[in-house]
Image: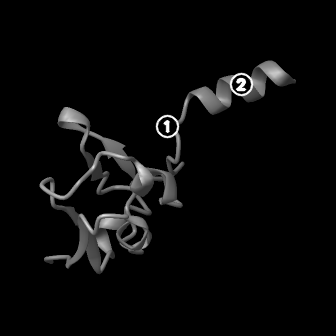
Amino acid sequence: MKRIIAKTVKSYDIGGCLRRETFCALEWRAAKPVWNTDRCFKCGVCSLSCPDAAIIQVDEGFYDANPDRCKGCGICSEACINEAITMSPEKK
């Protein structure tokens, strides 16, 4: 039984959605996080605070949101200790 569960878990990304095509947050999100790299300490608090595991580390240790996973809740912006993240209205 444990082997079957392990194989199932490995086949999905961390924080992933089983039916991404149907529930892509990009289609209905009202705001998105925008990072100011001049203010970012690269501490990772934003990534740890995200309830959807949508924040990933990118170039040179900075962070960005995966648009398929980010729901625009703003928790990362509130958690940022240096105010490096602002929530920007999503352009439709």
Identify the residue at horizontal 43%, vertical 61% (top origin).
22
Q: Distance between the residues labelled 2 and 1?
A: 13 Å
Q: Pick whichever, 8 or 79, lies toward us.
A: 79
3 sits left or right of 47 in the view: right
Reply above or below: 49 against 7: below
Q: Which of marks 2 and 1 is nearer the N terminus?
A: 2
Identify the residue at horizontal 40%, vertical 57% (top origin).
46
38 sits left or right of 1 in the view: left
| Residue furthest out toward the right | 1
Residue 47: image location, x then y, percent: 43, 51
Numbered circle sitting on residue 13 = 1
Identify the residue at horizontal 52%, vertical 47% (top origin).
15
**Labels 2 & 1 near each other (Cβ < 8 A):** no
Residue 82: image location, x then y, percent: 29, 64
| Amino acid at dot 1 | Asp
Residue located beneath label 2 in the image: 6
Residue 16: image location, x then y, percent: 50, 47
Element on which disc 2 rests = helix
